[in-house]
Amino acid sequence: MESMLNKLKSTVTKVTADVTSAVMGNPVTREFDVGRHIASGGNGLAWKIFNGTKKSTKQEVAVFVFDKKLIDKYQKFEKDQIIDSLKRGVQQLTRLRHPRLLTVQHPLEESRDCLAFCTEPVFASLANVLGNWENLPSPVSPDIKDYKLYDVETKYGLLQVSEGLSFLHSSVKMVHGNITPENIILNKSGAWKIMGFDFCVSSTNPSEQEPKFPCKEWDPNLPSLCLPNPEYLAPEYILSVTCETASDMYSLGTVMYAVFNKGKPVFEVNKQDIYKSFSRQLDQLSRLGSSSLTSIPEEVREHVKLLLNVTPTVRPDADQMTKIPFFDDVGAVTLQYFDTLFQRDNLQKSQFFKGLPKVLPKLPKRVIVQRILPCLSSEFVNPDMVPFVLPNVLLIAEECTKEEYVKLILPELGPVFKQQEPIQILLIFLQKMDLLLTKTPPDEIKNSVLPMVYRALEAPSIQIQELCLNIIPTFANLIDYPSMKNALIPRIKNACLQTSSLAVRVNSLVCLGKILEYLDKWFVLDDILPFLQQIPSKEPAVLMGILGIYKCTFTHKKLGITKEQLAGKVLPHLIPLSIENNLNLNQFNSFISVIKEMLNRLESEHKTKLEQLHIMQEQQKSLDIGNQMNASEETKVTNVGSQQIDKVFNNIGADLLTGGESENKEDGLQNKQKRTKDLTDTLMDNMSSLTSLSVSTPKISASSSFTSVPSTGLGMMFSTPIDNTKRNLTNGLNANMGFQTSGFNMPVNTNQNFFSSPSTPGVTKMALGTPSTLPNFNAVSVPPAGGKQTQQRPTDMSALNNLFGPQKPKVSMNQLSQQKPNQWLNQFVPPQGSPGVGSSVMGTQVNMMGQSAFGMQANPFFNPQNFAQPPTTMTSSSSASNDLKDLFG
């Protein structure tokens, strides 16, 4: 990469040095900037051709430079001869003005190092194009190296040279004297121009007489730059020292031969023995047959043969050559017409431009771009011709690349975009809008193309608005979404609302309907559909346009209308419109059909939604019922556990009461010990049966060490009168004795007071407390005092179920169904929701550390002072007294 950059740098430096050394100090550089060396031309290709620009106007030019270093090898008088010859040719060219002659922009300027003059922009000389690259920069530019002449270029080029010679011979009375490929220049547009008047000969006779042209004898001792090219020189120059206009025609014949033979002349001449070579050439020309001209097209072969005839009078003149059928090619005639376009009036131009689209496809792209496009663009200054020229320019643009379009065509179209008259200009642009949006850069689209469309929509002419609205849908897919949303759609809506023309209003609705597919769904719902309700007129065409937009939105896969929009906005708008008196039967049927479709979809969608909601509700109900059934089963198991607890405490109470009557007797002490032992065995058996029950309750917190058996502590406190006296009863066990079972810890203290406070006979008080971590047993409730007890939902004993598990007690199903689960508790539990009272029947506590303790501790649980004051004091009924009697025997 670095080597390539160095090579490029050295090349640029070399070229810059060449330009600087060649033109340094020449007065031409005062007015012109000299650029790159592009070609060579003139006699012996001695002139270097550079591109350049005029400093004041930035006009593009070609700078011809002759470097005097080329003639350093000659003597001073030879140098002077060469310089004089070159000066003479340029001065003569400067005096002559004709479309077929190279146009001089700045006359010859001489400095110490070079000669220089400026002309119209130039591509190369014909010799360069045919492969003679002498005096060209190295490496040769690919533009010249790969340049191939098309047939139409060759034909029209030779025609141009013939026309130039006709001008010189007929009008100027001059013989050029050196018509060669070196002296034929192709300008930037591809036109062939004549230069190199170094050896021209003017007529010495007055203009009204037969012209007479003096001729100099060939001097082989002169430098080659002071002599014409002998390979293209007529034989009479050398052999008879005469010249006439026919001599130039011979040179034209040799040029035509060279063009069709890759730059090779008819004969090669030995410049050292010029006379002998021409004598031999004369013999060959006299015997020249068609077989020697096989490379020349057949339709011009005979004419070339005549041009190369030894006898000057046989050769056709320049006027005759311009009229031969070979030059009647449609492409050559078209190019010739363009060259004379400035001479035509508007009617002739319009007729020509109308037929041009049929010719353009037959011409090569390079010819169209170089020759035709500049001529067409020059007509944009004439507004009357723009509608005829513009279609051809846009046709050329279709064949150009995007780069060529941006460089060559778009700059010329800029002023035309802003023209509104005549109206055909906007129409043509709108018809080719897809081309403009495809090849125009985004910035230019926003700055030039779309503003033209906006002006067309806002134009006062109804015709322009209609045309614009009809054409917009054809290129809507090429417009960027922000421009369409923020600029185009608002103008279409304004055109629809503000116009007084029914056609414009209808076309606006049709246009909106066609471009809906390029819009966003929510933009249509929020902006387009509400706009339809603002349209004031109720003509049938307008109503059908409104219906069409609704239907397109409703049926389009990407858009669609929500059922909320249908029910709330669309149908309330459409239904009144459907009964307008202006509508005929078919139009009414169209309205009703769309309304029915909307209603059916509305019904279907909403019905589906309601069905889904119903299914979800039913599923939720089934889940609730299942949960209730599970809760019921859990309650049954819990009731069985309650019976086991009742059994335990019944035995405890009976033993305690029995032991109290015989505590003062000696034999009673023995019975007491015996009963204590029996009580211990009974408790251990009962607790073993309780702990064997499996647990089937909801999962507890993951922080618990035991997930299958939640830790539960039970505490009960009873306060009841017994014989109206306080009794301090002990169970006869050691103070620290406890019963260890699997998963349970039951310490029993000897100093616990089960019946610690006196109370009025027949009145039972009970306080229940539940820690915050326990589940709420909503099923346990008591009706208000004095009210009749109603059927209660079975008590939710899920907390106890966690403790005792689902193991069934050893009772029959009939016994279970006849039992009243916890009936004695239902008499004392306050109503659900009473302040300060928990819902747990047994005062259950859960130890979250994973250790389960089931014990009866007097101080924390059975002491009434540690409980919150019960909000309600309930008087026990006779059934409650009976239950207590059943409990304690």
Image (cartoon, rainbow, N blue to C red):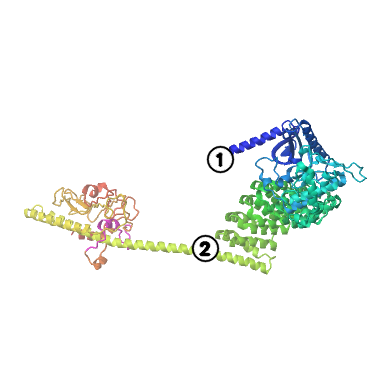
Residue 769 shown left or right of residue 45 in the figure: left
Q: Amino acid at mark 2?
A: His
Q: Amino acid at mark 1?
A: Met
Which residue does the numbered mark 1 point to in the structure image? Answer: 1
* Marks 1 and 2, how far apart at CA: 71 Å
* Residue at 30% over, 49% down: 703
Indicate the position of residue 455 as horizontal and vertical percent values. 71, 50
Which one is earlier in the sequence, the residue at label 1 or at label 2? 1
Callout 1 crowding tier (Cα within 10 Å): few <14, some 14–19, many ≥20: few
Indicate the position of residue 836 as horizontal and vertical percent values. 32, 50
- Residue 692 in the magenta stretch? The answer is no
For numbered disc 1, what is the local secondary structure? loop
Q: Which disc, if any, is residue 343?
A: none
In this picture, is 407 found above or below 545? above
Q: Which disc, if any, is residue 606?
A: 2
Number of marks:
2
Indicate the position of residue 361 as horizontal and vertical percent values. 72, 56
- Residue 792 in the magenta stretch? The answer is yes
Q: Which residues are magenta?
A: 782-809
Q: Nearer the viewer, residue 766 or 501?
A: 501
The quadrant of the rendering that contains the N terminus is: top right
The quadrant of the rendering that contains the C terminus is: bottom left
Question: Mark 1 against mark 2, which lies toward the viewer?
Answer: 1
**Of all residues shown, which one is farthest toward the bottom?**
585
